[in-house]
Amino acid sequence: MVRKLVYSSRGVKHLSSEKKGVKVHRICLSEEVLSEYIGGVLSSKERDSVEEHLSRCSRCRKMVSDVHTVLKKSSAGKIRAKLRGWLKRNFWLIGSFLAFVFSFFLSGYFFQLLTAAALMGAKWVFDSRTSKTLIMVYEAWKKGDKEGTEELLSRFKTR
Amino acid sequence: MYYNVCTMPVEELLKRCLRKERKAWDEFVRSYDNLVSRSVRYKLKSMNIHACGAEIEDTVQEIFLYIWEKDKLRGVSDVSCLEGWIAIVSFNFTSTCHMRRDARDIRDTHSLEEFHTCDDVSVSLGEMLESPTLNTEDMVYTNELVDLVENEVLKLPVKQRLAIKFNMYDGKKQKDIAEIMDLPISHVSTLIKRAKNSIRKGIKNIIDV
Ligand SMILES: [Zn+2]
């Protein structure tokens, strides 16, 4: 049996055997190499060599497949969390918009709904992170805290 | 619930964590806590281990501690590999941790005499090997067929072999295989089709002979 080492310098992990009845001693891929394969940063030659190993080693293949499943679920969760975050941030804006739209349909409550829309709109403006940061920047500037102002402004810029 | 909500670029975060900056580390933990927790749950489920929320939380904390103390982040060469790397480390840690725990439990709860008492339960070989669907002849035939397929799979080019193994052995969908192998779905579909044809042809030739 020819011993084939994939990334021998970094891949010492465990022995594996896939072929029935024959003990195949193969050095498995390390955490780093596997993550580089999944991350798609390997050169085509390195990729081929990793795929050669994966096509024969069920253990490493299972690892790749499991990581793919977890990351896929995680990205779906990220989208859901982003959506939840957006809804939470813009709760008052949505309320204001709905009140404004309904004010045209429910003519009996026109002024009440319009006032509600204006109040919710104002709440959204003062609650938003941008306004909060700008208020903090203004207060820090008024106090003469130059360092604090710069830090707040840099945070504001990176957002 | 957090999903990688870093306020600084990941590259910067990694650098600061490597410099052992406490603030950056806290942010790292907050950003990847959910991924680690998800990986631990997934691994435990695949190992058929039922763990309560507190146990999972403990394992998650141990994983972060392990990464911090052993300076494991040095192994991450590129930020695009970070999430995959975290999942792999979490999988490996969880399985090692539970294997150790199981070994300790067996050592603590069973004495040598206890194993001897198992002789009292008598089960015949027939009962142990009983199979309602397959008789011995069927099993030999199936085993031979499996070996034939195995041999034909080994003869395939690497890409075809990997695609067919993901698809037929591991039950992965073509879309997932395409994502893993970084290929278009049409290419994966062709690889699988060609591999199946080659295997079919190879087996047919052997049976005909
Ligand atoms: Zn392997």
Image: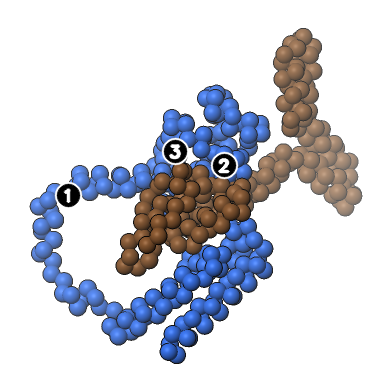
Mark 1 or mark 3: which comes first in sequence?
Answer: 3
Front of the two marks 1 and 3 = 3
Where does label 3 land, which residue? B63
Question: Would residue B158 be found to the left or right of residue B182 on screen?
Answer: left
Subunit ID for the residue under disc 2: B
Give whichever of B15, B149 is nearer the camera.
Answer: B149
Q: Colour of chain A?
A: brown
Q: Quadrant of the C terminus of chain A?
A: top right
Q: What type is the residue that disc 2 sits on?
A: Leu
Distance from disc 1 to disc 3, alpha carbons, whole Å, reads 30 Å
Instruction: Please tell me in which quadrant of the rendered image residue B126 appears.
Output: bottom left
- B174 to A116, vertically: above or below: below
Q: Colour of chain B?
A: blue
Distance from disc 3 to disc 2, alpha carbons, whole Å, reads 15 Å
* Residue at image location 84% in from the left, 49% down from the top: A102
Q: Position of residue A80 (x, y in %)?
A: 64, 49
Tell me whether circle 3 and circle 2 mark residues in contact (CB < 8 Å): no
Instruction: Please tell me how many numbered marks the rendered image carries.
Output: 3
Question: Would residue A102 be found to the left or right of residue B155 on screen?
Answer: right
Q: Tag 3: Cα neighbours inside 10 Å, few (<14), some, or many (≥20)?
A: many
Q: Position of residue A97 (x, y in %)?
A: 83, 44
Instruction: State the SS at label 3.
Output: helix
Where does label 2 land, which residue? B82
Q: What type is the residue that disc 1 sits on?
A: His
- A107 to B202, vertically: above or below: above
Mark 3 or mark 2: which comes first in sequence?
Answer: 3
Q: Position of residue B114 (x, y in %)?
A: 12, 53
Instruction: State the SS at label 2.
Output: helix
* Residue at image location 36% in from the left, 80% down from the top: B144
Q: Quadrant of the N terminus of chain A?
A: bottom left
Where does label 1 land, which residue? B110
